[in-house]
Image (cartoon, rainbow, N blue to C red):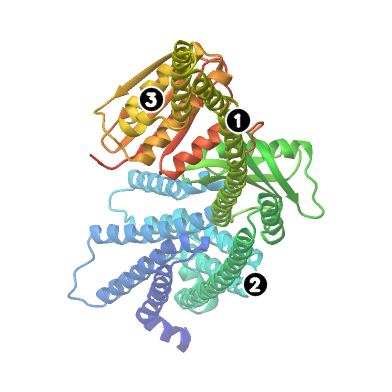
Amino acid sequence: MSDLTAFLQSNLIFIYFVYGLAHFVMGLAVALETARTSQLRFSRALPFLAAFGITHGVNEWIEMFSMIAEQIPTVAQEPTWAATLKLGWKALSFFFLFEFGARLLIQLTPNQKRWLRGLPALAILIYLAGMFAMFLRALPGMPLASPAGMWTNYALGVPASLLTVVALLAQRRAFLRENLPQFGRDFVGAALAIGWYCLLDQMIDEPTPIFPANILNADAFLHLFGLPVEIFRTIAVTALAFFIIRTMRVFEVEYARRLDAANRARFNAQEEAKRELTVMYETVRLLGASLDVNQLLSDFLKQVVTLLDPVVGAAIFLYQPSARALKLELRREREGFTCTASQEECAQRAAARAFETCEIAYETDADSDVSFVSVPLVLQGKTIGALCLAHQTAFSNYAVIHTLARQLGIALENARLYAQVQEKEELRGQLLERAVAAQEEERKRIARELHDETGQLLTALAVGLGGVEETIAQDPERAQYQIAELKNMTMHTIDGLRQFVSDLRPSVLDDIGLVAALRWFAEQYAERTKLQVDFQVVGAKRRLSSQVETVLFRIAQEGLNNIGRHAHATRAIVRLEFADAKVLLAVEDDGRGFVVAQVLGAQPQRRAWGLLGVQERIELVGGKFKVESEPGRGTRLMVEIPIKDEG
């Protein structure tokens, strides 16, 4: 035996210490790294490698303390239960190594997950079955520690080590695919170290009668190489710890990559947010630049298609109350993209669903790679249409299109209100012209009435008085008869003037009030037109301001006159209701009715100037005006005017 061999043999305790320390340091280093948050699949198996390193390091230190105890004469021989506990601890460490290899392969080959997950448990069952068979066949007085230790190596240590070698080489290929080639050599080194560890630790151990331990054992190795196998085990495990710890640098690289990816994502998000803000700013600026609906929609769609990626086309659908359906108002497409018939149907379906559900809707054209996203256009809680966008790649700017849809709805409402104001101004001008013309016609009628009837009667009265003056002296009886005729003519003239003045403005309205005036007019109108008119009063009657009473009287006049001219009705109802803070007037009939939208809609087929005049009168006193009518079901005119308690 050489001096070196003798020196190493005499220092096996220290070698076991270093051997256990290498395992423990490797396990501790891996355990510390596994505490990091990582997205690498490799990290999910590392806790078992850490457990193997720590438990096997403790196992080697236990062996070291056993060797120390053997050199102390006063220490009793190791009890059987302690040997069994050491064997179980060693088996546990090999189980952790087995689990590490299986878990790592499961992460790399998920299609083999089922049988790999059960492999460690199967190895434990085989190991326990072998131990039980060995116990049954043991002869009395025959020690089981050495054969049981070799069986632990062969049944657990060797397959666990080989499985780990395969897993480490597979992980190397995975890192190469993930563009981490700098760790390839470390994994090859770790795999080679595990292989040598398998040969030197599990295959070469204490000599036992079991094959191949009766040939391949520590004594044979010492005789062949002149050096104890423990020194090579220590070198192999130290190399394993070195390469495994080097592979832990992958977490630093991953962290740097994640940080870089986060920075790039933040930059991209900032750029995307900048683009979205640009789109919203430019689009909202255009929405506020025009009150013409067609120009507004055209500019809006042009801006969306040009600036909002990946949109290749856009369309606006608005609800048409007359047709009770969505109608395509305007469509615009990016240059190079043409919408097909099937894509148009797809867009129509998406818009209809968004309109009906008031939620975002999606549709994909089966004949192409074009998809559609549609958002409802909502204004003051009411859905007025839908905005539909076509895109060929993934679309995620939902917040932007929701904002744009809200702004478009507001812009459309502003345009509609502006159009209503313009229309009202135009109607007011036309009403003024008609009012002036009506005043002139009324003046002509008054002049004609005064000239043709009252003037002639007064002239006849003057001529008759002249005749009476000539005949009173010659024929008093005849003069008396003429005076009587002139008296009758005078009374007839007075009655005509009274009726004429009453038609202009009934004195009963000023003298007695609105209720009496409406009852008088209803009776007069029924007598003149032979139409049944029911006048109803609800609530506590009271006088109103002169302006309000005049407005309500004229509205009732206009309502009954319209019934007589257009309704072909047999019965009319005038209902006046006094409430606490308002007065309501309703005029209804059982006539032929009409379509309200065709008369009072945004684009009427004919103008109802009388109803428009009523509307103007109502607005002057701050009231509300409503007409309900359907063909064949009559008409109901309703007026509501707020009032103060005027006593």
Which numbered tag is attached to residue 518?
3
Task: Give the mark toward the camera: 2 or 1.
Answer: 1
Q: Residue furthest left?
A: 74
Q: Position of residue 197 (x, y in %)?
A: 50, 68
Q: Residue at x 64, y 34 (%)?
A: 604
Q: Residue at x 45, y 50 (%)?
A: 120
The residue singled out by tag 1 in the image is 448
Q: Residue furthest bottom?
A: 3
Which numbered tag is attached to residue 2?
none
Disc 1 and disc 3 in contact, CB within 8 angstroms = no
Task: Give the mark toward the camera: 1 or 3.
Answer: 1
Position above or below: 125 against 491 = below
Q: Amino acid at mark 2?
A: Pro
SS assignment at label 3? helix
Instruction: Judge the density around disc 2: few (<14), some (14-19), many (≥20) Cα neighbours within 10 Å.
Output: some
Task: Give the mark toward the camera: 3 or 2.
Answer: 3
Position above or below: 290 against 270 = above
- Reading the chain from its start, which is encountered first: label 1 or label 3? 1
The residue singled out by tag 2 in the image is 181
Q: Amino acid at mark 3?
A: Leu
Q: Nearer the viewer, residue 637 or 88?
A: 637
Name the quarter where the C terminus is drawn: top left
Q: Position of residue 79 (x, y in %)?
A: 22, 61
SS assignment at label 1? helix
The reply to whether residue 22 is in sight is: yes
Q: Residue at x 62, y 41 (%)?
A: 318
Q: Nearer the viewer, residue 514 or 456?
A: 456
